[in-house]
Amino acid sequence: MENLVNLIDLTTEELTEYVVSLGFKQFRAAQIRRWLLRGTVDFADMTDIGIADRGLLNANCRTGLPRIAEKHISALDGTVKYLFELWDGNVIESVVMRYRHGISICISRQVGCRMGCVFCASTIGGLTRNLSSGEMLGQIICAQADIGERISSVVLMGIGEPLDNYDNVVRFLHEVTSPDSLDIGSRHISLSTSGLADRIIRLSQEDLQITLSISLHCADDAGRSELMPVNRRWNIEELLTSCRKYFEITGRRISFEYTLISGKNDSMDDAGKLADCLMRYLRGIPFHVNLIPVNPVEGKAFAAGERDSIERFRDALEKRRINATIRRRLGSDINASCGQLRKKHIESVIPPDIRQELSEN
Ligand code: SAH
């Protein structure tokens, strides 16, 4: 079972080579590819392929597409959250959001996460495994098939640290933008990272026009290290220097995420430090700050401040001529923020004593 090939992981050329190696005629690859891109999970449903050939496929490979385990639709704004089950039983989340300019999807990159950010539900329980590029693509394909509409933009902001699964993420980015795959424009793709500075520099050299989004969340090293352990490996100076290089090489505006947590990083002093540090390292290059009121996570004592304190934080940045917006919360009635649905699902299927053991290991 383990070593079956996932067809959704293959490029058009690789798929052609593969089906020929199974003894099929070359044109079968295009047929199979069409079914895959339409979200057909089972070979049994590929009706223009003969029964014997479908049997041969079943014995040698799988589509590798996920199945919808749960689906929640927000009554407030139409946001759809999927819990997808992968071929090995692991579950991940994706969120489809409707905007005036089109439909956007937020996808996962790993099963779990090992970055340990203290406010984030995705990292509770650590990293189980990386997703393959096809498993990232599969989330978009299956959501698109389910809603029956084209998805026009992708944010890599779901579960997992994308730059901790670097090769698969880069392969995914080349695939998803390819005209014979989903053909989504790279300018409509953004990747959010907790700040692996060396990989940011590597990413700048991949010739991709994607938007880089940095989870900054605190502008002094001691405070950031407390919230985000990754800061102990790459501090703010290294991170922001790598952002400057990313801009110099790609010419793409950088976006910063700043999750506001009451009493931790949301004072006027914090706003001043944020403005100082962005001006110190990024003066003269275009960037934008997204302010996100923290989403409460069960078992963690973090709360968002009042609306007017969040607005004061934004105003303080704007006074220093820093573009800042307060992120609108979509799907707040359906656990739409990162990692929460998977956490709930795991809690409902794994007994508490075993969960305890897993989180200790
Ligand atoms: N590993 C990537 C993607 C994480 S999810 C990264 O760190 O950027 C996308 C964003 O949501 C990140 O900025 C993350 O820090 C933020 N986030 C995580 N948990 C949150 C919570 N409970 N409330 C608000 N934002 C949160």
Image: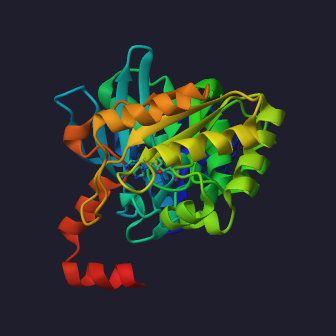
In the rendered picture of this protein, how many numbered marks are placed on residues? 0
Nearest to the observer: residue 230 or residue 33: 230
Q: Residue at x 77, y 40 (%)?
A: 244
Considering every residue shown, the one lying at the far top of the view is: 100
In the rendered image, the vertical position of residue 6 relative to residue 152, given as above or below: below
Q: Residue at x 51, y 47 (%)?
A: 269
Q: Could you tell me if residue 49 is visible in this image?
A: no
Residue 260 on image: x %, y %: 41, 46
Figure coloring: rainbow
Q: Say left or right for 271 vs 312.
A: right
Residue 230 on image: x %, y %: 60, 64
Quadrant housing residue 90: bottom left
Q: Could you tell me if residue 33 is visible in this image?
A: yes
In the rendered image, the vertical position of residue 183 relative to residue 329, given as above or below: above
Nearest to the observer: residue 5 or residue 321: 321
Residue 334 on image: x %, y %: 21, 42
Residue 152 on image: x %, y %: 49, 22
Quadrant housing residue 30: top right
Q: Residue at x 78, y 32 (%)?
A: 250
Considering every residue shown, the one lying at the far front of the view is: 269
Nearest to the observer: residue 123 or residue 20: 123
Quarter of the figure with the C terminus? bottom left
